[in-house]
Image (cartoon, rainbow, N blue to C red):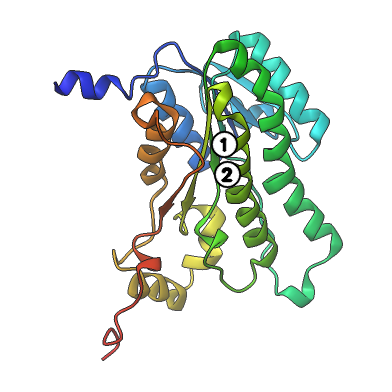
Amino acid sequence: MTGDVLSRFDLSGRHALVTGGGGVIGTVLARGLMDAGAVVAVQDLTLEKAEAVKAHHAFAADVSNADACRQLVNDVDTAIDGIDILVNCAGINRRKPIVDVTVDDFDAIVAVNMRAIYFLCQAVRDSMVRRGRGSIVNISSMSARYSYETISVYAATKAAVSSMTRSFAQEWARDGIRVNCIEPAVVRTDFTKPLWGVDHRQRFFDELTPLGRLMEPDEALGAVLYLASDASSYVTGQAILLDGGITTGANWDQFA
């Protein structure tokens, strides 16, 4: 029985594209998909970053450009003979108070965090239909529903990612394509170090998170493998919140 259960997570014969795969989280996800048996192509802004993951294939592309998104999918589709898993992990942020956000800031964050995901999903549909199955996993954020100061645009784009996930899932369910997302809290990486690298902010996360610590990069892997695999074959349009319990509420005697 145990073997039958574990086989649901087996990705042998699956072909995956991971965008933003050269980042800390993207690297963990790409290598985890390979460990589960998938053939994996990794995209990042530079070929050097993509190749450092040591996946089966590496691609450089600027996904802030919709045409580049389509070209990337075409190139990967050719290289690995179709795509049935897409993990949209590319993302950026510029932390600023609302009054300091420029049009350039706004457009840059929207282009990578929202528009790229939309057009990558759009571009990959035909390949998934051709292969007779597909699973798209979008990396959203807890900030889609629980925001902090200085991330107003980032939070808005992540709310859009969670919303788009439901829209794509609704339209493509009959095509055999499942679309889900994860919504992680703050993950301990260099990207988030301005948040946790200051003593009083580290105490804030430690004391207000029920599990008492920040999320580590490899803690995103289990949810992504679940959503990418047949273990979640009846799951679509869902957001899995990985927040250490932050949104469960608070203990009003915590600081007694």
Residue 190 image label: none
Residue 25: tell me if it is visible.
yes
Residue 149 horizontal/vertical position (percent): 60, 74
Disc 1 to disc 2: CB gap under 8 Å: yes
Q: Is 211 located above or below residue 240 in the figure?
A: below
Q: Quadrant of residue 214?
A: bottom left
Residue 215 horizontal/vertical position (percent): 39, 55
Q: Quadrant of residue 65?
A: top right
What residue type is disc 1 on?
A: Ala
Nearest the eye: 223 or 215: 223
| Residue behind mark 1 | 169
Looking at the image, residue 169 sits to the left or right of residue 60; the answer is: left
Q: Is 56 located above or below residue 205 in the figure?
A: above
Residue at the extreme front of the image, as rendered: 174
Residue 211 horizontal/vertical position (percent): 28, 63
Q: Is 135 located above or below residue 139 in the figure?
A: above
Image point (43%, 75%), residue name: 199
Image point (65%, 14%), residue name: 77
| Residue behind mark 2 | 166
Within-10-Å neighbours for mark 1: few <14, some 14–19, many 20+:
many
SS class of the residue under badge 1? Answer: helix
What residue type is disc 2 on?
A: Arg
Residue 26 horizontal/vertical position (percent): 52, 37
Q: Quadrant of residue 28?
A: top left
Looking at the image, residue 226 sits to the left or right of residue 55; the answer is: left
Q: Quadrant of the C terminus?
A: bottom left
Q: Quadrant of the N terminus?
A: top left
